[in-house]
Image (cartoon, rainbow, N blue to C red):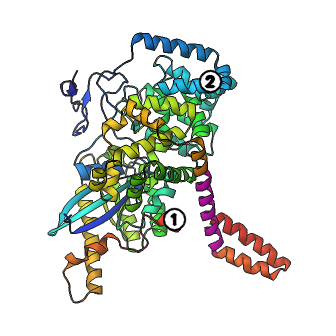
Amino acid sequence: MSLQKSVKSVGGDQDNTSICSSVTTQPDRHGFFGGAQYSPEPKRTLSPSTILKREQKWLRMLNNWEAFMSKNYKKVRERCRKGIPASVRPKAWLYLCGGQLLLEKHPDEYEELLKAPGDPKCMEDIRKDLHRQFPYHEMFIREEGLGQQELFCVLKAYSVLNPKVGYFQAQAPVAAFLLMHMPAVQAFWCLVSISDKYLSGYYNPGLEVLQRDGDILHALLRRTAPAVHRHLVKHRVEPVLYATEWFLCALTRTLPWDSLLRVWDCFLCEGVKVLFKAALVILAGALGPAKVRKRAAGLCETLEELRHPPPAILGEDYLMYHMQRLGLTEEDFEFEHQRQTAKRRAMANRRYIKHPVYTLFLALRALTSNVGYDLAVKCKRIAYNGA
Amino acid sequence: MAKTYDYLFKLLLIGDSGVGKTSILFRFSEDAFNISFISTIGIDFKIRTIDLDGKKVKLQIWDTAGQERFRTITTAYYRGSMGIMLVYDVTNEKSFENIKNWIRNIEENASADVEKMILGNKCDLDAKRQVSKERGEQLAVEYQIKFVETSAKDSLNVEYAFYTLARDIKAKMEKKQEASNPAGARSGTHQLRDERPKPTSWLSRCSVL
């Protein structure tokens, strides 16, 4: 079925409202009626016998999960990289991220959390976002439909469980994406694991970790695609401008659906560095050709290229192939992590030392009297908290 | 490459989450409205070139995520802005009350002479209105900022708002140029300076502070 043929405007029930994206009456195989994620072409699938074989392997693995993870992790990783068969994917994700363990440990907690009233500010923020996640997906298309209700519950439960984070807007697409694959209680525990372990610190106030990881990405790019790195530096394209959504939403708003599922198969197995690898491939793919960089001679032009990379480089085969061939080792990641963490700490210290109250602290300490000392300690505390 | 514009203005949209910043920008840049928007995560931008009293003015408009937690990354972009739109939702009292906090944010992070404007969006939803037009006007008078009620959905006053802000920036700039250059050189020669108003670029600001 061609896109043109199936396109039908549904502007009838919204007075004066022009719908900008075309919407079909038939969802694609992932449940999308339209929008950026809509992919009507049938997937080029593996042979039925290959799928069957893989399904059996996965079922065997899921039945002996502990043993495989502790003794044969490399096998699990290899199978994740090949792609988890669609039929076992929800269960595999639940096991991979540790959601299953959490669920077994706290069987009734989700229901309990939902009984709590919840922080009013969080509840309001969540409500404002319910209709703004994958609005073209069959689960979320209807205002206050089941999908949006479940999304509310999952996000509310998390905000009650972890009041320090509460609700952060980037969690909504992640939770919605999980809800497309599994029941709410499972999606909830996966979200807990992703928010607290995989993307640990990303959702905390301050967004320090996000900014640090942006710097790490930028530094790694220098190794994998030096010309692209130079281009970004030249035009002052900071990671926070292009990578914020990639990282915070774990690419759920960035990749075509088939690619996203494959990347998540690896992400839940190997962790956040998979997001880095995908980001590096997108950066190199979008800005790799010299003629593109020449055309994109400016900040906005460069961001535009990154926002709409050529579809070919976002395809699952291209993406998965190149992610494995970046030539980055575990040590490279670790090295950059240490380096950027130290850099940020040094920067914070510099700010702290320059703080006028800290200068006063130094002067007072010189007095060495008890009174001076007490005052000095106070000043130091103010300088530290205020810096 | 020859420039296709006479001026480049950087504008910024700020305000609480869900007040319609992205919709306003979409209305202005594409002249359309979409009920199926996704929440903005981080920072986004759109560009539109307008004709202002015979000059081509390129507007680079930055759209920001509204949730408070994003402020640590968005305030870094206040400094380079020449104009800021403060948006609230007339059907949401809280978003109106928060305008004061957003103004404080501007005072702390933007350059002192930045042009500002307050927009009360969603004015088509009269049945759900919580903030009267008079209160909006009163707040604007209090802070001496221009004010207009808009509807991105019905395309009401959105063009007007951007044109007004752009015109104010242009007038201020020309006045400044005249003051520094009383001989009256033609304004066309000053474009480069307009693009980077400060030696400390707005992009490097987060590492400066």
Residue A262 sits in which quadrant? top left
Q: Is residue B122 visible?
A: no
In the rendered image, residue A255, in percent from the top left (x then y), is placed at: 39, 36
* Closest to the observer, B189 or A170: B189
**Residue drawn at the location 51% of the way across and 57% of the way down:** B72
Residue furthest to the right in view is A370
Q: Main secondary structure of the magenta part?
A: helix
Q: Residues within 10 Å of mark 1 (few under 14, many from 20)?
A: few
Give the residues drawn in magenta, as a range.
Answer: A337-355
Disc ID at residue A100: 2
Q: Are marks 1 and 2 on the same chain?
A: no
Q: Chain of mark 2?
A: A
Residues marked 1 and 2 touching at CB (< 8 Å): no
* Closest to the observer, A222 or A84: A222
| Residue to which mark 1 is pinned | B207
Choose mark 1 or mark 2, whichever is in front.
1
Q: Measured along the vertical axis of the image, is residue B77 above or below residue A47?
A: below
Quarter of the picture containing the N terminus of chain A is top left
* Closest to the observer, A13 or B180: B180
Disc ID at residue A325: none
> Is A101 displayed left or right of B22 in the figure?
right
Residue B162 sits in which quadrant? bottom left
In the rendered image, residue A356, in percent from the top left (x then y), is placed at: 64, 76
Q: Residues within 10 Å of mark 2 (few under 14, many from 20)?
A: some
In the rendered image, residue B144, in percent from the top left (x then y), is placed at: 37, 71
